Image (cartoon, grey):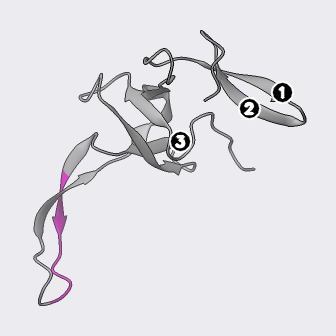
Amino acid sequence: MVKKFKIHKDDTVQVLAGKDKGKQGKVVRVITKKDAVIVSGVNFVKKAMKRRSQQDAGGIAEVEAPIHISNVGIVCPKCKRPVKIGYKLDGDKKIRVCRKCGEAL
């Protein structure tokens, strides 16, 4: 069974809980198996990287780690703050809308 999430790739989200609370960024990847998302510029962790070639530096690198999907909220372009998502039928197509102002996401 494939899980469906209301947050998709390239959505602008805000972190609601954790060490980066309040920061905003774009969703780079949605990891359905872990119920997590990777957000650009948020939740950096240090990771030991092995040298792969002569030119590759290796050492300790900072990479973006996944955040649980419940700890991020989608940002409405009109309200400029995290909102809940509703759905509206646009002809035969279901579109995501902001529950506060009705703006399409």
- Identify whether 25 is placed above or below 57: above
Percent x, y of residue 92? 90, 36
- Contact (CB < 8 A) between labels 2 and 1? yes
Q: Is residue 72 above or below residue 39?
A: above
Q: Quadrant of residue 21?
A: top left
Amino acid found under the numbered disc labelled 2: Ile
Q: Nearer the viewer, residue 56 or 78?
A: 78
Disc 3 on helix, strand or loop? loop
Q: Which residue is mark 1?
A: 89
Q: Nearer the viewer, residue 48 or 81?
A: 81
Disc 2 residue crowd, few under 14, some 14–19, many 20+, Cα 10 Å: some
| Mark identifier at residue 26 | none
8 to 53, vertically: above or below: above
88 on left or right of 64: right
Which image quadrant for residue 90? top right
**Residue under pointer 2:** 95
**Residue in view at x 43 percent, y 27 percent:** 71
In space, the residues marked 3 and 1 are separated at their CA atoms by: 26 Å
Which residue is rendered at x = 60% and y = 9% of the image? Answer: 100
Count of numbered marks? 3
Q: Which residues are magenta?
A: 46-53
**Extreme top residue here?**
100
Q: Is residue 48 magenta?
A: yes
> Closer to the observer: label 3 or label 1?
1
